[in-house]
């Protein structure tokens, strides 16, 4: 079964930065990987994805503030988040895409709180 271990979240002031990490099981790292987030009372939403070739795409709200990248030898997916805003507050999850669909298996996520 796929395993995700997300980390790197925390409390940061508006305008600050965080780098999220997700260590994944080897069997799934060869797929398109992505980040999602879920704020209280809201549905989970897409944040970013990266293909095996390194091409990234982002949710409209990102507007150049985030960067997704992967460290293949260490089976780790990253999300560098800059210029954070209070509306970025959410639990962030990583996931992978298989046969055109995102997995329905989720890890515990990592909490990001942006507040002064």
Image (cartoon, rainbow, N blue to C red):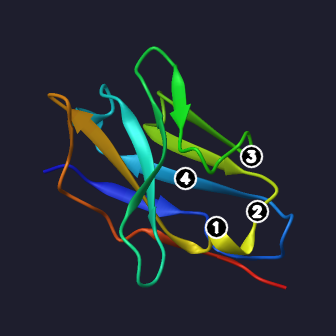
Frontmost of labels 3 and 4 is: 3
| Cα–Cα gap, marks 4 and 1 | 17 Å
Q: Is residue 19 left or right of residue 43?
A: right
Q: Is residue 15 above or below residue 41?
A: above
Residue found at x 84% / y 64%: 16
Give the numbered dot on residue 21. Answer: 4
Measuring from the top left, give residue 107's x and y in whole percent. Answer: 31, 64
Q: What residue do we see at 68% from left, 47% from top?
A: 80
Of pointers 3 and 4, the one earlier in the residue sequence: 4
Q: Residues within 10 Å of mark 3 (few under 14, many from 20)?
A: few
- The answer to the question of whether label 1 and label 2 lie on touching residues, with beta carbons closer than 8 A, is yes
Q: Tell whether label 2 touches label 3 (CB within 8 Å).
A: yes
Depth-wise, is mark 2 or mark 4 nearer the camera? 2
Q: CA distance from mark 3 to mark 1?
A: 11 Å
- Camera-side mark, 4 or 1: 1
Q: Is residue 77 left or right of residue 2?
A: right
Which secondary structure lies at badge 4? Answer: strand
In the depicted view, which residue is nearer to us: 63 or 6?
A: 63
């Amino acid at each position: 079964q796929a395993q995700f271990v997300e980390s790197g979240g925390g409390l940061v002031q508006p305008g600050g930065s965080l780098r999220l990490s997700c260590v994944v099981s080897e069997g799934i790292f060869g797929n398109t990987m992505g980040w999602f987030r879920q704020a209280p009372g809201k549905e989970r939403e897409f944040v970013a994805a990266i293909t095996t070739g390194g091409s990234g795409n982002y949710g409209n709200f990102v507007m150049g503030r985030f960067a997704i990248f992967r460290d293949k030898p260490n089976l780790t997916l990253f999300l560098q988040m800059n210029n954070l805003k209070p509306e970025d507050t959410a639990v962030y999850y990583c996931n992978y895409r298989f046969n055109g669909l995102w997995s329905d298996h989720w890890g515990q996520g990592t909490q990001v709180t942006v507040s002064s």
